């Protein structure tokens, strides 16, 4: 497994691989796949924590599904020109300021 330095590098790597594989660059399509994977990760989490009956429809683990969600989030950020690392820092600053006001 390789060392992954930062979110910008991850976005670039994921986007290059997806383009090379001919995957859709349409943000609407990527958003739909992201929502689908989020649902799959939820089902796997519920199954693994005893809230949902075990069945054959849930093939991947919660952690594997989170990887799918992360990949699609990186793709969505890349095709929309969003600097995900910058937005994450913005959100963390916002949360930090809100907690100081309490």
Image (cartoon, rainbow, N blue to C red):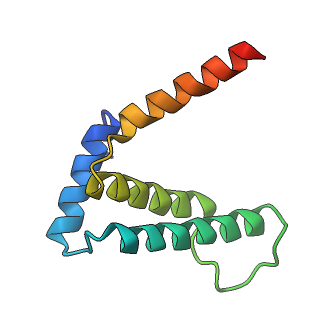
Farthest residue to the front: give it.
101
Residue 7 position by quadrant: top left
Q: Is residue 63 above or below residue 60?
A: above
Q: Pinpoint residue 58: horizontal percent, then vertical percent.
A: 64, 78
Q: Is residue 45 left or right of residue 40?
A: right
Residue 72 position by quadrant: bottom left
| Count of marks placed on residues | 0
Residue at 62% over, 20% down: 96
- Quadrant holding the C terminus: top right
Farthest residue to the top: give it.
100
Residue at 69% over, 71% down: 43
Q: Pinpoint residue 37: horizontal percent, then vertical percent.
A: 53, 69
Examine the rendering and report whether any part of residue 52 can be seen.
yes
Farthest residue to the left: give it.
20
Q: Pinpoint residue 47: horizontal percent, then vertical percent.
A: 75, 69
Q: Is residue 59 above or below residue 99?
A: below
Examine the rendering and report whether any part of residue 3 can be seen.
no
Q: Pinpoint residue 70: horizontal percent, then vertical percent.
A: 45, 54
Q: Is residue 29 above or below residue 91?
A: below
Residue at 21% over, 62% down: 17
């Amino acid at each position: 497994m390789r060392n992954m330095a930062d979110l910008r590098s991850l976005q670039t790597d994921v986007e290059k691989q997806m383009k090379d594989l001919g995957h859709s660059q349409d943000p609407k399509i990527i958003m739909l796949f992201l929502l689908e994977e989020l649902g799959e990760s939820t089902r796997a989490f519920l199954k693994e924590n005893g809230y949902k009956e075990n069945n054959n429809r849930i093939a991947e683990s919660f952690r594997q599904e989170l990887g799918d969600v992360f990949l699609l989030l990186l793709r969505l950020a890349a095709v929309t020109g969003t600097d995900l690392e910058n937005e994450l820092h913005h959100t963390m600053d916002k949360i930090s300021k809100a907690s100081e006001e309490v």
